[in-house]
Amino acid sequence: MRAAELLADGIARLRAAGLDGAAGDARVLLAYALDIPRDRLTLAMGDDVSTPAQHRFQTAITARAAYRPVAQIIGRRAFFGRDFAVTPDVLDPRPDTETLIEAALEQPFSRLLDLGTGSGAIALTLLAERPDAQAVAVDLSQPALKVAARNAKALGLSSRVTFLRSDWFGAVGGVFDLIVSNPPYIGVPELADLSRDVRDYEPRMALVPTDDDGSGLAAYRVICAQAQNYLRPGGWLRVEIGYRQGAAVQALFTEAGFDHVSLRKDLSGHARVVSGQAPLGQSPSEL
Ligand code: GLN
């Protein structure tokens, strides 16, 4: 069978399953099955496809028709221009989260802490962008830490990152210039509004905070309450938020004593990142 026929069949199967973006997904899955870069696909359309590659494609289409995220099927996702391994143990890095990277790169930092690192996409991107920086990246999930360590190795960043199993700050020591986090922020009542891809396949612990009261804010409460014990004076805390949480999370930052609390929007115009600066304190001359 030729690649073009296989693709048409795959698109039809994904459309029948009710998926938006069926054509784009089928193309990505075909490039994966053929083991060629996506931009080579058009040239390969007239080629005969080997039997193993046909099987690989059909298996991938079956998984996608059951709403498994494309990143989990192909095992990778591009984030901020780099490739990250993705498994069902980690949140699929999203373009929204690139807003957190842009915010974090606004100030210089050399010591970075990433809370709930998942695939490591945030910590590793920041290390790759700042060649003199060092990071501690923590997660409660040991399987997630294994994926993050794999990504660190693939990007040649292992020597600059320490991965730790930790419940937020629990196992963390030291003082940092920058703390970043994309914590779980979905309130239980909102789970029903998530797409099936996310709700049925992404790790629940990366989506919904433990002890949530329905607001999705539980992780921000823990992080805001303790962050200043781990930040140098003048250091920054920056977190990703759900688009309706801007006011609530800014209030938590302010109550915790952060200065210059601000909200940043993503490319879709949604509130996405809250930042605040740890107080500089009085300089000795003012005492
Ligand atoms: N942005 C994700 C979603 O809306 C949630 C990620 C998170 O909870 N940190 O599906």
Image (cartoon, helix red, strand yellow):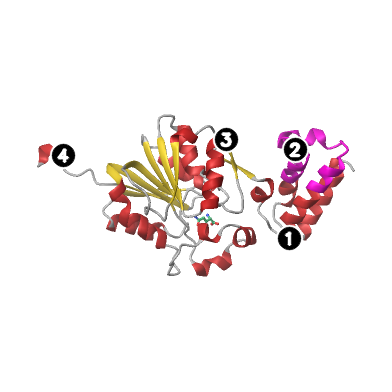
| Disc 2: which residue | 35
Closer to the N terminus: mark 3 or mark 1?
1
Of marks 1 and 4, the one in the foreground = 4
Q: Within 10 Å of the Cα at label 3, are there few (<14), some (14-19), or many (20+) other Cα atoms?
A: few
Closer to the N terminus: mark 1 or mark 2?
1
- In the rendered structure, the answer to whether residue 214 lies left or right of residue 31 reads left
Report x, y in % for residue 64: 72, 54
Amino acid at dot 1: Gly
The label on residue 55 is none
The label on residue 18 is 1
Q: Are marks 3 and 1 in contact (CB under 8 Å)?
A: no
For the C terminus, the image quarter is top left
Q: Quadrant of residue 136?
A: top left
| Disc 3: which residue | 154
Amino acid at dot 2: Asp
Closer to the N terminus: mark 1 or mark 4?
1
- In the rendered structure, the answer to whether residue 146 lies left or right of residue 17 reads left
